[in-house]
Image: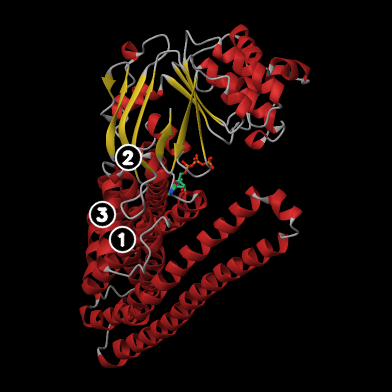
Amino acid sequence: MPLTPSGKTRFAMGAFRSYFADVRRDAGRDLPLAALLVGAGALLEGIGIVAILPFAALITGNADTQTARSILEFMGSLGISTEVGRALVLSCGFLLLLALRGLVVWKRDTKLFYMGLGYVDRWRSKLFRAIADAQWSVVSNLRRTDIEHSITNDVMRLSSGTDRMLKGGAAIALALVQLAIIALLAPTLLLMVLSLVLVAAAVTGPLLRKANRLGQRLTNSGRQIHSVLGDFLISQKLARLNNAQNQFLDRFDSSVRDVRSHQLDFFKSQTAARICFQFAAGCVVVAALLVGFFVLLTPLSVLAVTLLVLARLVGPVQMVAQTGQAIANTLPAYTSLEATLAELQDAAEPLTELDRTDHKMGPASLVLSDISFAYSESSPPVLTDVDLTIAAGEIVALSGVSGDGKTTLLDIIAGLHHAVDGAITVDGEHLDTPSAFRNWRSQLAYLPQDPFLFDSSLRENLTWSAEAVADEALWTALEIAGADGFVRKMSDGLDSRAGERGQNMSGGQRQRICIARALLRKPRLLILDEATNALDAQLEKDILERLIAMRDQFSIILVTHRRDTQQLADRLVTLSGGKIAST
Ligand SMILES: Nc1ncnc2c1ncn2[C@@H]1O[C@H](COP(=O)(O)OP(=O)(O)OP(=O)(O)O)[C@@H](O)[C@H]1O
């Protein structure tokens, strides 16, 4: 199942508003300070520019603006009337202003960077949490590589988009202050300067949709790269055995080419927009100069400062325009993440605290009544009206043709899937709430068909799902699971590493470590889904006999196709076509 609802993500203001509101909500209490720093930075930049006026008046000896006159008069009232004195005070003031501006800008940029980092970190955590909390039926249908792509690539794009959005906010503030300066100094030139903003809008506007389209393609191709890489890494052995590496390579290269081409297209469109804007901005500056000097007869110092502001305005206006493109390009990643999160959160199972007082001791008894189940509303039922009773301490073997629903039934017993109809009762109590199922899961140990070990030491592998365990208990569990012998022979004993997915060990060794790990959970029900099928018949029999001897501690449900193994159980239950055929 694709992570996002398939179909095109349109560049809609709605999506942008949602993204913007999310960033704002996330910023929370940081927002007022950030806004203050952004405003102060822009204001100090503006003051720095205006401070040039009295300098110009001093140099030309002609205070031709009200601002310059006021500043010089103010200095006179303080007794600073010589040219050298004024120059000194102005220089010191100017340098102080620069230093203060530097400090504020440093604080502002650090704050914005911090907010951006926090925002994406929280997205990662939200997604991780949502995956952990969502019902298994939803999570098990997600592609692992799609999840990886979302939590790495999409979130990284969100990071750069959010960074641009926050810096874009600072650029808007700067542009507004500079426009205000021009409005104060030369209102007649304001219209001309405003045309700079219009030029930016005209150049960028049509490119937003393209940026958004390229962003969507980037999301799809990026997901494809993850998918091919994931498939290749997980099936390397198979690929080599079938000499099929080239198939993966071709698919990988093609996806990488797609990503490069989308990135290149986006880069080209951004660069073209920048160059067009710079040329148009040059035209505006030349026009402002000519009109200001020849038509409006603007004083030279005002014209100089206006041109300076204009030149400085080009940067922020261009930055705002490019921010628009960058955000449009990021929006597909955001909407994809938003949809994924919503889907997972809709399927959230409340993670209640485990009720330890509810944790009984001794083997569990279990009654399944009229259990029916289908994987979706449109698919045929996998289980129909299943009735099954397992007494405390009973050993039940479950058999049936492949695909007849044995694993599905075990998943339902473990509360991973929920029956569409029917009820499960454990020790006479109905399991009817998520917390009841969660508590129940803490009382059972379930060994699936493919044993999984983490890439860490055997000790960590054995103890990760159990309470604090002493080495003595570890060795006892290993002995019962028939694993103590080979673990003792390993150079680092319990500290030996299992390797990725347990690849440093044989299939049978992995299964035995997993059995020991299950025992350390002190289960009341042990579910073995072909969990010993990699062992030779004698070893399997020895281990199962030791497990069966512990029936005063746990009941066992055992899925196996081996007739000898079935005979070890008290009872054989056969599933056929999703129904109990014999019991
Ligand atoms: N996640 C899933 N989504 C949709 N259908 C599924 C899913 N998992 C299993 N099925 C279907 O449910 C049916 C029962 O599968 P299940 O794994 O329970 O069979 P099984 O008896 O354990 O098979 P085997 O002995 O081969 O392990 C099969 O037809 C399978 O295609």
Q: Quick one: SS at disc 2?
A: strand
Q: For residue 196, which quarter of the picture?
A: bottom left
| Badge 2 density bin: few <14, some 14–19, many ≥20, Cα 10 Å | many
| In front of the other: 135 or 96 | 135
Q: Is residue 165 above or below residue 349?
A: below
Left or right: 142 in relation to 357? right
From the image, state whether disc 3 or disc 2 is nearer to you: 2
- Tell me the residue at 34%/90% (across/down): 290
Identity, as a three-letter code, of the amino acid under mark 2: Ser
Of pointers 2 and 1, the one earlier in the residue sequence: 1
Of pointers 1 and 3, the one earlier in the residue sequence: 3
Left or right: 433 in relation to 397? left
| In front of the other: 496 or 286 | 496
Residue to which mark 3 is pinned: 21
Q: Are marks 3 and 2 in contact (CB under 8 Å)?
A: no
> Which quadrant does the N terminus fall into?
bottom left
Which residue is the extreme one toward the front? 582
Number of dots carrying numbers: 3
Using the numbered discs, state the Cα–Cα distance from disc 3 to disc 2 in whole angstroms.
Answer: 44 Å
Using the numbered discs, state the Cα–Cα distance from disc 1 to disc 3 in whole angstroms.
Answer: 32 Å
> Is residue 89 in sight in this rendering?
yes
Q: Quick one: SS at disc 1?
A: helix
Q: For residue 512, which quarter of the picture?
A: top right
Q: Quick one: SS at disc 3?
A: helix
Residue to which mark 2 is pinned: 372
- Tell me the residue at 23%/58% (across/down): 74
Residue 344 x/y as whole percent: 34, 46
Using the numbered discs, state the Cα–Cα distance from disc 2 to disc 1 in whole angstroms.
Answer: 75 Å
Q: For residue 565, which quarter of the picture?
A: top right
> Is residue 60 in sight in this rendering?
no
Task: Find residue 47 and name its label.
Answer: 1
